[in-house]
Image (cartoon, rainbow, N blue to C red):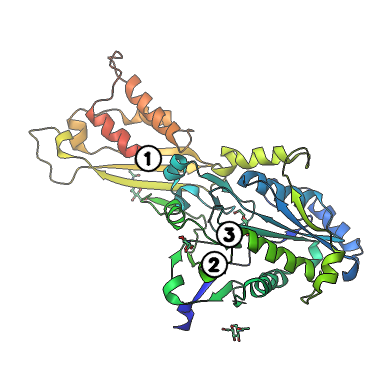
Amino acid sequence: MAQSMLNKIVVNGACIVGIVGRNVGYRPTTTIKGYATQLKERMLVPEEKVTKSVFMSQSTDIYANLALEDWMYKNMDFSNHHVMMVWRNEPCVVIGRHQNPWQEANIPLLNEREIALARRSSGGGTVYHDRGNLNVTFFTPFERYDRKYNLELITRALYRGFGINATINERQDIIVSGTASKLGRLTAYHHCTLLVNSNKEDLKKSLAKREHGIQTKATPSTPSPIANLSELDNRVTIDSLQTAVGYEYLRTPALHLADGGQSLINKQRGFQFINPTDEWFPGLNNIKKELQSWDWCYGKTPEFTVSRTFPVPPELLAPALVYSATQELVINMSVEKGLISDVTLSIPPGLVESGFHGQASVITHLKGKRFTSEALNALEEAMLTKRSNSDVKKLDDREQFVAKCFDQVVNTN
Ligand SMILES: *[C@@H]1O[C@H](CO)[C@@H](O)[C@H](O)[C@H]1NC(C)=O
Ligand SMILES: *[C@@H]1O[C@H](CO)[C@@H](O)[C@H](O)[C@H]1NC(C)=O
Ligand SMILES: *[C@@H]1O[C@H](CO)[C@@H](O)[C@H](O)[C@H]1NC(C)=O
Ligand SMILES: CC(=O)N[C@H]1CO[C@H](CO)[C@@H](O)[C@@H]1O
């Protein structure tokens, strides 16, 4: 019972942690080994010589912020300077490195609402972000990565700033106690993001599971309970939380949890406004472009298959005939790197007898097409051009039905 009164605000400790020189994913780095050796030989400065900064990203573009995170991993030296970066985004859905966007998110809705979809270079589940949540990233040298420290720091900030009593559980989720009635909501939400006051409806809809018929080995997300900090204490806003977490970071020594108070804050480099642009961070635009690309966001999806069955409406069947079984159109598809690699259309006899032909030619047109409206367009075009009477520029009812089913498979509406 007590358990149900606990709510997660931060999940999976995934919060975080830039490790210098670690391969962050989407581009294999050949230098990892070199880095590791360098790291071993490096003498780290003692704790009191480490200074800290809080970087406040001035961008709300998910791709710019992810690119900045990546740029910092790759290019900055944190051996005597630790950084906490706080940032937030315009509404977006972020999937993990090995996930399937068509399975995790409601892609048509994202397109319609212009909600960005991004793929992280790290693993983990899918998160919905909007301006109501704060994203916190800690950067330290490899040897000084300390997940517990980071999570504890956030709970200390919540307590000092707002009197919110949060604890960390065995899974390294941050848990806050609250009344079940206010907070007992279950939604798919993952990763280390502090949810201050998110748009609950958009969150639910963006991550809504649709009927998709997808079979895959990609890692699906496990829903976690989430709490809304502003519901716990109405003084919690993005700005006040950012300030509370930032000051807590600056008043805490680099390697252990203690309160260094104002005198420690004075020794730090303080809060800094950061613009994730190419002028500030040369090369950042290229990273950003890659993160935005279709090949990265969709093309990195692990291979999957889709199988969907659609009953054919009686009016599309040959009139005078009676069929013993339900007439069903079955569409099977294999998708590799986001591109259709194989398609099987099983056309029921009723549809064939009523005059629909030609799956084979249609199918060859689909191979290599993106699993998007690109495939739908190719299908429609193939059905039109296979006709002998090429003057007819409109699909007939049967073809329209097949196109509509296909449309549902590739998830464009
Ligand atoms: C915080 O919550 C824990 C667990 O519910 C409790 O044991 C502890 O006394 C609380 N601390 C404060 C300062 O309220
Ligand atoms: C968070 O709280 C605000 C204010 O009570 C509410 O409008 C919003 O829907 C809540 N969001 C979530 C995700 O619970
Ligand atoms: C389509 O896929 C389903 C599920 O994997 C399978 O049972 C069925 O045999 C497949 N049909 C064809 C025609 O490939
Ligand atoms: C620390 C933290 O919460 N990091 C998350 C910030 O947002 C990105 C994109 O959603 C996630 O990948 C990180 O896990």
Crowdedness near tag 1: few (<14), some (14–19) or many (≥20) residues, C-alpha within 10 Å: some
Q: Quadrant of the N terminus?
A: bottom left
Residue 70 in percent (x, y) is at 71, 49
Q: Secondary structure at mark 1?
A: loop
Q: Which residue is mark 1?
A: 413
Q: Is residue 253 visible?
A: no
Disc nearer the start of the sequence (2/1): 2
Residue 163 in percent (x, y) is at 62, 76
Q: Amino acid at mark 3?
A: Gly
> Between marks 3 and 2, how big is the CA–CA gap?
30 Å
Q: Which residue is mark 2?
A: 234
Residue 314 in percent (x, y) is at 15, 39
Q: Amino acid at mark 2?
A: Asn
Judging depth in this view, the residue of 172 and 350 nearest the camera is: 172
| Mark 2 Cβ and ligand 2 under 8 Å apart | no
The disc label shown at residue 26, or none: none
Tags 3 and 2 touching, CB below 8 Å: no
Above or below, comparing residue 332 to residue 159 in the picture? above
Disc nearer the start of the sequence (1/3): 3
Label 1 vs label 3, nearer the camera: 1
Crowdedness near tag 2: few (<14), some (14–19) or many (≥20) residues, C-alpha within 10 Å: few
Tags 1 and 3 touching, CB below 8 Å: no
Disc nearer the start of the sequence (3/2): 3
Seen at 47% across and 83% down, the residue is: 2
Judging depth in this view, the residue of 212 and 131 nearest the camera is: 131
Q: Secondary structure at mark 2?
A: loop
Q: Which residue is mark 3?
A: 124
Q: Is residue 272 visible?
A: yes
Q: Secondary structure at mark 3?
A: loop
Q: Amino acid at mark 1?
A: Asn
